[in-house]
Amino acid sequence: MPTFSEYIVDLDRLMHIVSYGPSKSFCFQRLKLLESKFSLYSIQNEAREAQAQKAVPHRDFYNIRKVDVHVHHSSCMNSKHLLRFIKHKLRHNPDVRVTAWWIHSFVRSLVRSFVCSVGRMLPQ
């Protein structure tokens, strides 16, 4: 398994490749081509695929027809839930090692990180 510092080096290399102009142009054109091929396939085979999905007697995660990806901002964690989560982690897992990704050698416990950043522990 690669180390965290190897991950950062690989991520940096990947970011340079992604930001390189000619590769961005090539990828954009390739994606447009694949999108048009898929659109043509969908037009030709839409009815056949819909009928094949309806013919399956049971429905589960692997053969559903529609996935709802519409997520509301209000369904995210609010400040009360976040505070409750932090308190729970500090009470039950205070010695978990945490890392700062921007500093390679920065490793300390969760409770130590919290005390250093806030200056005190949360009230019980």
Image (cartoon, rainbow, N blue to C red):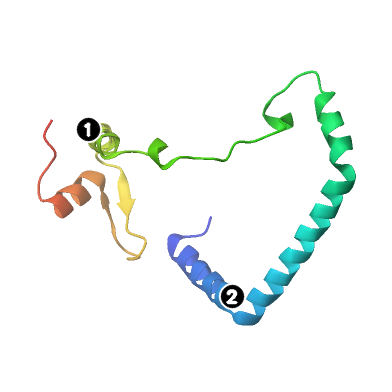
Q: Amino acid at mark 1?
A: Arg
Q: Is residue 104 rendered to the left or right of residue 14?
A: left
Res 69 label: none
Q: Residue at x 81, y 29 (%)?
A: 53
* Image quarter hosting the C terminus: top left
Location of residue 115 in the rendering, given as x and y in whole percent from the top left corner: 15, 48
- Say if 9 sits above or below 20 in the image: above
Q: Which residue is mark 2?
A: 17
Q: Is residue 93 rendered to the left or right of residue 71?
A: left
Location of residue 92 in the rendering, given as x and y in whole percent from the top left corner: 26, 31
Q: Earlier in the sequence, mark 1 or mark 2?
A: 2
Q: Residue at x 85, y 23 (%)?
A: 55
Q: Residue at x 41, y 42 (%)?
A: 73
Q: Which residue is mark 1?
A: 91
Callout 1: 10 Å neighbours few (<14), some, many (20+)?
Answer: few
Tag 1 near tag 2, CB within 8 Å? no
Out of 38 and 107, give the one closest to the viewer: 38
Location of residue 59 in the rendering, given as x and y in whole percent from the top left corner: 72, 22
Out of 1 and 82, give the one closest to the viewer: 82
Q: Is residue 68 rendered to the left or right of residue 82?
A: right
Q: Residue at x 85, y 48 (%)?
A: 43
Where is residue 87, by image quadrant?
Answer: top left
Q: Amino acid at mark 2?
A: Ile
Q: Secondary structure at mark 1?
A: helix
Residue at the top extreme of this rendering: 57
Q: Nearer the viewer, mark 1 or mark 2?
A: 2
Q: Is residue 32 rendered to the left or right of residue 74?
A: right
The residues bearing labels 1 and 2 have C-alpha atoms spaced at a distance of: 43 Å
